[in-house]
Image (tube, grey):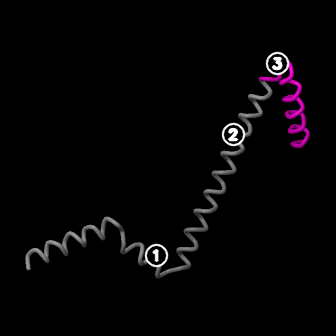
Amino acid sequence: MQKLGARIAELSIAMEKMKLAEYVSLLERPYRLLYINFLTGIARGLGIAVGFTILGAIVLYILKRLVMVNLPGISSFIATIVSLVQLRLH
């Protein structure tokens, strides 16, 4: 009987660590689950947009620097790309 009681105590501790009660209560309220998933999606989308914008700005900065170095062949190609992007932005 003591082994059973110890095993039940171990299982209850394991369930607390898994936060199973919170998960079950979340599943019982589907609108809250949808709300949390909606906010998570907005945060991810915003993070992707900001990250891509920063990455794009860094790439354009590097391309401008390569044009200033005036490497033969590459600089004219990069200059065309940069001018097209700047024309599109304005």
Give neighbour class at mark 2: few <14, some 14-19, many 20+ (Cα, 10 Å). few
Please tell me which of labels 3 and 2 falls first in the chain: 2
Q: Position of residue 20 (x, y in %)?
A: 36, 72
Secondary structure mostly taken by the magenta-highlighted segment of the chain: helix
- Seen in the picture, residue 83 relative to 70 is either above or below; the reply is below
Pointer 1 local density, CA inside 10 Å: few below 14, some 14–19, many at least 20: some
Pointer 2: what residue? 55
Disc 3: which residue: 71
Q: Viewer-nearest of labels 3 and 2?
A: 3
- Report which quarter residue 22 is drawn in: bottom left
The segment highlighted magenta reads: 66-90
Which residue is painted at 87% across and 42% down in the image? 89
Side (left or right) of 16 relative to 43: left
Of labels 1 and 3, the one closer to you: 3
Instruction: Name above or below for residue 46 compared with residue 35.
Output: above
**Residue 45 drawn above or below residue 15:** above
Tag 3: amino acid: Leu
Residue at x-position 19% and y-position 75%: 8
Q: Residue at 77%, 23% (x, y): give it.
A: 65
Residue 64's place in the image compared with 69, above or below, is below
Q: For label 3, count other residues whose C-alpha is less than 10 Å away and answer few (under 14), some (14-19) or many (20+).
A: few
Circle number at residue 26: 1
Name the image quarter holding residue 15: bottom left
Extreme residue in the bottom direction: 28
Q: Amino acid at mark 1?
A: Leu
